Image (cartoon, rainbow, N blue to C red):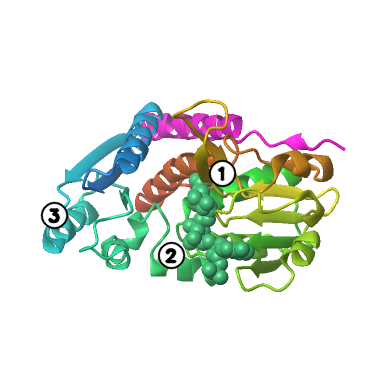
Amino acid sequence: MSAAVIDGKAFAANVRGQIAEHVQRLKDENGITPGLAVILVGEDPASEVYVAAKHKQTVEVGMASFEHKLPADVPEAELFALIDQLNADPTVHGILCQFPVPDHLNERDVVARIDPAKDVDGLSVVNAGLLASGEQGLVSCTPLGCLMLLRDQLGNMSGKEAVVIGRSNLFGKPMGQLLLKENCTVTIAHSRTADLPEVSRRADILVAAVGRAEMVKGDWIKPGATVIDVGITRIPHPDKPGKTKLLGDVDYAEATQVAAAVTPVPGGVGPMTIACLLANTLTACCRAHGLTEPAGLTA
Ligand code: NAP
């Protein structure tokens, strides 16, 4: 058996295309331009790369991109004043603060300061609570991206056994909630789970979000399962001195021999995250203006 490769890069490009069309319609028919504000505190090189990628893709889909770079020692009050100003700005529909932030700032407090209706990272306690209660909110971008890939791959997921490895607020918990909403029977596994290979083998849908390279072996996978690999571990490149290589949580070569479909790393889940950030910004904009939400781009 050789598994189908779930091409997240192509799927994300398609999602961005749908968003761009919707944005154009909003401009033409309603005179509205969705806007995303990104706050970067300090000069972490990896964060600068992410913020630049977000800016580029935001502009490419026709949205307004507002970048706010603050010094690493910015007082909390100054950061909060900026967030308050963005909360009140009607041209800004989505706000995110790039994490990690310097140690004198508390990520939880920063997220809590953002208006939940503009919390396009879906990380606030309010949005987590809305998801857990089955109510409309904004959903964390990476799990939303995985949901879109799974819906495309499987269609109806009702009754399927789903196992999510990892229970973070950023990924594992919202992913579990989304799969529950799809009527899957959901298990959320973690570092204390007894006999993880056995638990994983139950899964028709196996989602791994741990950050341990190639932990999930072929014999952890039920034949015919759909496997979503969220994990990212950067290792020195074996053939290219000075370069690095990304590995997922799943042993890809083994998984392709057992699974029906699997996401590669890179090129699987990764590209979906920014695409879903843009989808959430569009959704937040439509809700702010009482307009119909984009079909297929929400949970
Ligand atoms: P995290 O907060 O570190 O959570 C990791 C989870 O894995 C925890 O729940 C932990 O369990 C569990 N875990 C650790 N060791 C384990 C083991 N041996 N067996 C079973 N479970 C184990 O990480 P995260 O933010 O959820 O991210 C997870 C991975 O996804 C990382 O590699 C991250 O880089 C990647 N990621 C990728 C994207 C993307 O865009 N592609 C986005 C987000 C995250 P405990 O709770 O018991 O400690």
Magenta-colored span: 1-29
Residue at figure coordinates x 50%, y 42% from the top left: 234
Would residue 162 appear left or right of 143 to someone viewing this image? right
The earlier-in-sequence mark between 2 and 3 is 3
Q: What count of labels does the image hold?
A: 3
Which of pointers 2 and 3 indicates the residue nearer the eye?
A: 3
What kind of element bears circle 1?
Answer: loop
Check disc 1 and give the amino acid type. Answer: Ala
Q: CA distance from mark 1 to mark 3?
A: 42 Å
Q: Which residue is mark 2?
A: 127
Q: Main secondary structure of the magenta part?
A: helix
The earlier-in-sequence mark between 1 and 3 is 3
Q: CA distance from mark 2 to mark 1?
A: 20 Å
Q: CA distance from mark 2 to mark 3?
A: 29 Å
Q: Which residue is mark 1?
A: 295
* Residue 231 x, y percent position in the rendering: 57, 50
